[in-house]
Image: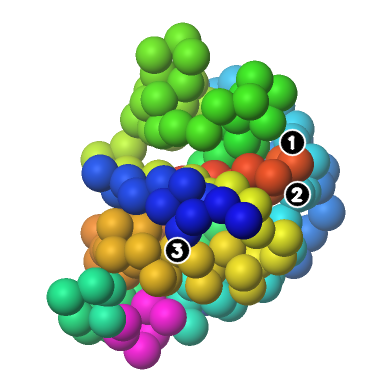
Amino acid sequence: MKSFLHRVFLPAALVLFFSSATFAQTLTAANSKPLKEVPATVNRTKMLQLVNAVRSKGCQCGDTYYYSAPPVVWNAQLETAAYNHTSDMSVNKFFSHYAPDGSRGGDRLQRVGYNWKTYGENIGEGYKTEKEIMDGWLASPGHCKNIMNKTYKEMGVAHVGNYWTQEFGSR
């Protein structure tokens, strides 16, 4: 069994969307280029419900209590960035916020046309369901802090193989 720290890397980091995986085709990035379609790898509605339920109540993240935060909405660009990073980790068998090409979360968001003011990224490994990964992230002060960050307005999540990525952003 992998240790908690190995399974969930500690990061330096309500509108529910009811749709199929093809919704990304109709959205465009800031530069007017269509987003590359990515498969729906998570239950978007469930992820939004889990995240927004915690944000609406407030949460103890390690030694710090965070008061309630406004709900986040699903964003196809953030989902695409999450999918790209999660796929990269799965295919290339690494677990890090730094990709082999040296890119970090902000770089990945820029690549999909998301012009962020603030962003946060959570990654996880070894969880099977949306509830399990959320429980893991909430048990980690850094991940929990990202979930409770009031500056984040949008979110996208992807799960490929054993890996998960959650991207938050505001613009």
* Lateral position of residue 91 relative to residue 140, left or right: right
The extreme bottom residue here reads 57
The extreme front residue here reads 1
Q: From what the image shows, is residue 129 above or below residue 158?
A: below
Horizontal and vertical percent position of residue 118:
26, 44
Q: Dot 1 surroundings within 10 Å: few (below 14), some, or many (20 or more)?
A: some
* Identity, as a three-letter code, of the amino acid under mark 3: Trp
Q: Dot 3 surroundings within 10 Å: few (below 14), some, or many (20 or more)?
A: many
Q: Residue at x 46, y 26 (%)?
A: 108
Q: Residue 38, labelled with which disc? A: 1
In this view of the protein, can residue 109 be seen by the observer?
no
Frontmost residue, 17 versus 162: 162
Horizontal and vertical percent position of residue 25:
75, 35
Alpha-carbon span between mark 2 and mark 1: 8 Å
* Lateral position of residue 155 relative to residue 64, left or right: right
Q: Residue 137, labelled with which disc? A: 3
- Frontmost of labels 3 and 1 is 3
Question: Residue 74 sits in which quadrant?
Answer: bottom right
Q: Is residue 57 magenta?
A: yes
Q: Which residue is mark 2?
A: 41
Q: From what the image shows, is residue 111 above or below residue 25?
A: above
Horizontal and vertical percent position of residue 63:
16, 75
Per the image, label 3 sits on a secondary structure element best described as helix
Q: From what the image shows, is residue 134 above or below residue 100?
A: below
- Frontmost of labels 2 and 1 is 2
Q: Is residue 68 magenta?
A: no
Per the image, label 2 sits on a secondary structure element best described as loop
In this view of the protein, can residue 141 be seen by the observer?
yes
The dominant secondary structure in magenta is helix
Q: Residue at x 46, y 10 (%)?
A: 101
Q: From what the image shows, is residue 50 above or below residue 106?
A: below
* Badge 2 vs badge 1, beta-carbon distance below 8 Å: yes
